[in-house]
Image (spheres, grey):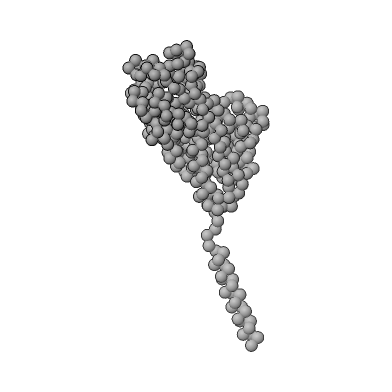
Amino acid sequence: MRNSRKFILLAFIMVLTFALTACGGGEETPADGGAGGELEGAVIVDGSGTVYPLMAHIAEEYMTNEESGVSVQVGRAGSSAGFKKFIPGETDFSDASRKIKDEEIAQLEENGLTMGEDVMEIKLAYDGLTMVINKNNDWATEMTEQEIVDMYLSGTYADDDVVLWSDIRPEWPAEEIMFYGPNENHGTFEFFYEVILDEQDMVTTANLQQEYSTLVDLVANDEYAIAFFGYGYYANNTDKLQAVNVDFGSGPVAPALETIGEDLPYAGFTRLVYTYLNLDYAKEKPQVLDYAMYVVSPEGAERLAGENGFAPLPSDMYAEYYTQLEGLK
């Protein structure tokens, strides 16, 4: 009788052990991600309004498919305004639609940060500066690069900068051009002013705005308006706007993902867009490093650039960034 009880007890223990092993021997939670992964905390990104749609999309995909416990907060204060937060250490990443300036690098150094050692520059994609006009504008659908530059330069056609469309070409309407663009907080303004206008004064009649959505509405509601901003904002508003095809010397070229690039037909108005990473934070906070690696992974900027109006970089450039970041683990 005693032996029988021992046998029953032993059998029960064996069954319980098998059941527990079966329950615990299923799929393991990936250490490097998976929705509902092991990482927690916040990642703070701010900066370029142009880059915002791309970075926000990457953040959404990351939180949905990789690490639901991480909160990636993406702002769009503008490239210059973003650096003002990044330099004193208020953000983990700073998006920019232009390269960081020497004076900003100097400010980083004053705060104990060195480019390359403490801050990593990541090229995200190519953007094409796009000139947009009202849907009813049937005369300025094609312009030369020089015509665009001249019309935006102060004093080219009138001392008071009240420029008529007929000043550009006599057969165009004798109506005042309403100039629009992003304000000085944005890297797009700086690219246009520094690269396109070669740092010459812009027309004083230009109406510069903080919000790109405001620029879209202003041009959509004014037959005689023209504005400049990144290709992505045009691509998302083709029902409201039309783009000017630009002649850089070999015939008019439409801004498009197939033409935007340093060696492609729209090269004259092509620029790189960036994000800058605080490497000290990436080393201290696992979620920051993990998100940075996702940004440059095949699932990040490379896959999502085109969906947000950017031309992706070659795959090997993203792979090189990934390898650099992996070395921080």
Position of residue 34 in the picture relative to residue 157 (left or right): right
Q: Residue at x 48, y 13 (%)?
A: 160
Quarter the N terminus occupies: bottom right
- Image x and y of residue 260, in percent: 41, 31
Q: Nearer the viewer, residue 24 or 87?
A: 87
Number of numbered discs visible in the structure rendering = 0
Q: Residue at x 33, y 25 (%)?
A: 138
Residue 15 found in image quarter? bottom right
Q: Residue at x 47, y 11 (%)?
A: 159
Q: Nearer the viewer, residue 244 or 111?
A: 244
Residue 142 visible (yes or no): no
Location of residue 84 with respect to 63 vertically, above or below: above
Quarter the C terminus occupies: top right
Q: Residue at x 53, y 33 (%)?
A: 48
Position of residue 325 in the picture relative to residue 158 (left or right): right
- Image x and y of residue 319, in percent: 49, 40
The outermost residue toward the bottom is 1
Q: Nearer the viewer, residue 18 or 69?
A: 69
Residue 211 visible (yes or no): yes
- Image x and y of residue 20, in percent: 58, 68
Location of residue 79 with respect to 22 vertically, above or below: above
Residue 310 found in image quarter? top left
- Image x and y of residue 220, in percent: 42, 30
